[in-house]
Amino acid sequence: MNDTARVSGLLDLKSLNFGDFLQGNDQAQLSFANSLTTTLQTLGVAKLSMDDVPELEMLHLFNMAKEFFALDIASKMVAAHPAQPSPHRGYSFVGQEKLAAVTGFAKDRLSDSMMQDSKETFDLGLPGDAEFPNRWPKDEHIPHFKAVVQQHYKTLERVQLKVLEALSLGLGLKRDIFLPLHEKSHHEMRLLHYPSTTAGDLTGDKTRIAEHTDFGSITLLFQDQVGGLEGRPLECLVMVGDCFQRWTGNYIRAIPHRVTTPYKTQGGDPDDDIPERFSIAFFGKPNRDARVGNLAHPQFQAVQYDSITAGEYNNMKLVKTY
Ligand SMILES: O=C(O)CCC(=O)C(=O)O
Ligand SMILES: [Fe+2]
């Protein structure tokens, strides 16, 4: 794999069984932790099988997401993301957010600022967060949406903290070292829909999501094609984000990724149909007041990062995207 993860092209990445960490003995846990850490260190992304997390009803959650994006625009705009970057909550229509503006990537395409993402999204954070209140559609337009989505925020948060625990173990650190840095639950969860289009439409200045790294510590990503949604095995990608790279002074690096034309349609007819696509991301994020400079550990000093807060770092990136 080159250094750009084509997240939709990772189907053949061998998956690690997360159950080994959740239920295994010390030896099984260490072996999982070492495999996860080596994979993230070399690739920046790992695939986990989530069969042992029964609370994850991803098919149900994907169906809710599909129902939401199928609403008419007026019903979706009840939960509209503001025109400005913050609070980063609610529904963003196709073209509203531009991830290309955030990094110096997309070098092989047009200049960053010209790339348009062809996606619509729904973002949420901690239920009841007064600083960044969530925005919800009306219950009568989409019954149970809020409850189901919020419940999965909690489940995915627990999964993410366990993944961080495994990563700490694999790095030879105290298992709970990252827990206090995430205890305020300042994570973000996102439902994504890429409308159906044609191959010709995803060339030039349009892509599905432009190349970027995620801003937080680690991301859990579920994609409708990665499988398992109709039953088990359920698979999830774990991607390293910027904050983890900063803490480890590049020992573990964030993975640049994007979503473009599926491989099988590349080089084909511009009129080829590209089906719609759904995905769900849980962006594990440090407490907004946590420092995201290098951790005090000899292994993590190769590249030095300013000791700014995660909130400041997040805003620096976010302000460019809306
Ligand atoms: O839809 C995907 O598979 C990736 C989404 C993503 O990278 C993001 O929202 O940060
Ligand atoms: Fe991403």
Image (cartoon, rainbow, N blue to C red):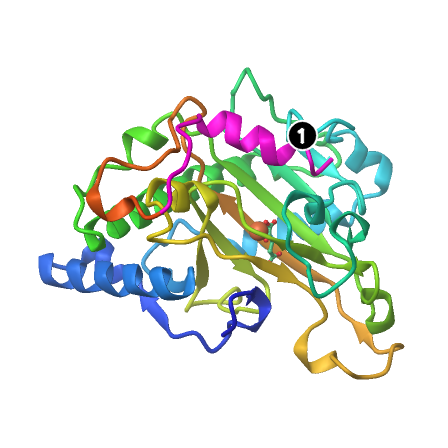
Dot 1 amino acid type: Trp
Which of 205/235 is in front? Answer: 205
Decide if residue 284 is in sight here.
Answer: yes
- In terms of secondary structure, where does tag 1 sit? loop
Is 99 a magenta residue? no
Q: Which residues are magenta?
A: 303-322
In the image: residue 4, left or right of residue 276: left
Q: Position of residue 319 (x, y in %)?
A: 67, 31
In the image: residue 16, left or right of residue 128: left
Which residue is located at x 70 percent, y 38 percent? Answer: 321
Q: Residue furthest right?
A: 271
Q: Quadrant of residue 135?
A: top right
Q: Position of residue 273 (x, y in %)?
A: 82, 74
Which of 94/153 is in front? Answer: 94
Which residue is located at x 47 percent, y 35 percent? Answer: 187
The quarter of the picture where the C terminus appears is top right
Q: How many marks?
A: 1
Which residue is located at x 82 percent, y 67 percent? Answer: 203
Where is 62 relative to 308, above or below? below
Where is 225 relative to 219, above or below? below
Is 317 a magenta residue? yes
Q: Give the residue pinned by disc 1.
A: 136
Q: Position of residue 142 (x, y in %)?
A: 70, 39
